[in-house]
Amino acid sequence: EWFRDFFGVGDLLKIINSGNYSQLLTYDGALAIARPLFPLLLAIELLKALIMKKFRAGEYKIPFFSYVFNAFVGIFIKVAVVTFCIGLFERFAIFKTTFTWYWLIYGYVVWEFGHFIYHYLGHKVRLFWCLHSTHHAPEHMNLSVSYAHFFFEGAYADFIRTTTCILLGVNPPMLVLIMFIDGAWGGFIHVGENLLKNGRLGFLEKYILTPSHHRVHHAKNPLYMDTNFCNLLNIWDRVFRTYQPQQDSVPVTYGITREMRKNSFLDSYFGEFIALGKDVYAAPGLRNKFLYLVMPPGWSHTGEHKTAHKVKEEYFKQIQEEVSEKPKRLKAEAVE
């Protein structure tokens, strides 16, 4: 049963056992075929790594234990939150859409807006970062990373995304389809170098977010920090100027900036909460304690901030200084 659930083959096996293969031509049949594709791709990635002798168990430790833990807790909360939001907010929608191709495009743009909001807050609000940091903790990129999440993050994410879509009139059945597409693509963009070396998808790089873009999002390099928050369409990253393509001159370094115990599931899952608790406990006054919860990671009541914004600012300042000093250095070398 666990094997069927992980590989998503339960519905497909039911259709095969029934002998009524015409069901494969229906919407449910298409989903039954599509569900096993991502787990199968992960299995191929693992198999290829084993054959090429590049498999390292530590690279999969955090995602594996996150998946096992979340399988017992997170999925029930996630489904409950989506159902709750649809039931509560549908009556307040500014208008209603239908299940058509043009409204599907509208719905996906709205979904990406909700995804951008949730994802941006996950990086810019310390308490939400505690939920999201588990996903950024792995120091290697492969398909299993898509399973590395704190159990409550899905509920928090879907509360924002579902509420945004429902209030802006997205048709609930169409929302389910959008969530399926988003989940499938969101898994694929974590594909590792064993399957897709540079992560680029040719001319599509200009129009959508590819594995290359998402590798940038998972980087802790100053240039790449807090970029590419969207999932498939890069429209809102371009609007809010958080779009960042990968540069060959700046290789991606994965992980989070906090020093972690290497490949530790417990540290990846609870470490940020412990660090936040220590900061709140040591902060003077209720105001500073509260600010540690809502300000960006790296904020300090002492003013010695190490936020992503501050790190990027210092990085670009250093680059600018190096550029301005280069002509002087070349001139001095020419004189010598």
Image: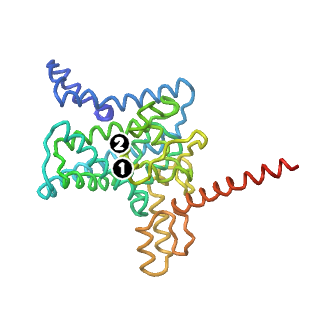
Q: Nearer the viewer, residue 200 or 263?
A: 200
Q: Tell me whether circle 2 and circle 1 mark residues in contact (CB < 8 Å).
A: yes
Q: Would residue 259 appear left or right of 210 to someone viewing this image?
A: right
SS label for mark 1: helix
Location of residue 101 (image quadrant): top left
Q: CA distance from mark 2 to mark 1?
A: 8 Å
SS label for mark 2: loop
Residue at x 45%, y 30% (from the top left corner): 202
Q: Position of residue 325 (x, y in %)?
A: 72, 55
Q: Position of residue 93 (x, y in %)?
A: 15, 55
Q: Position of residue 177 (x, y in %)?
A: 22, 39
Q: Nearer the viewer, residue 209 or 214?
A: 209
Q: Which residue is mark 1?
A: 236
Residue at x 43%, y 31% (from the top left corner): 203
- Tell me the tag on residue 94: none
Q: In the picture shown, does residue 243 fall above or below 128?
A: above
Check disc 2 and give the amino acid type: Leu
Q: How many marks?
A: 2
Q: Which residue is mark 2?
A: 233
Q: Would residue 220 appear left or right of 1 to someone viewing this image?
A: right
Mark 1 nearby-residue class (10 Å; few <14, some 14–19, many ≥20):
many
Q: Would residue 117 appear left or right of 16 to someone viewing this image?
A: right
Q: Residue furthest right?
A: 336
Mark 2 nearby-residue class (10 Å; few <14, some 14–19, many ≥20):
some
Quarter of the figure that contains the N terminus: top left
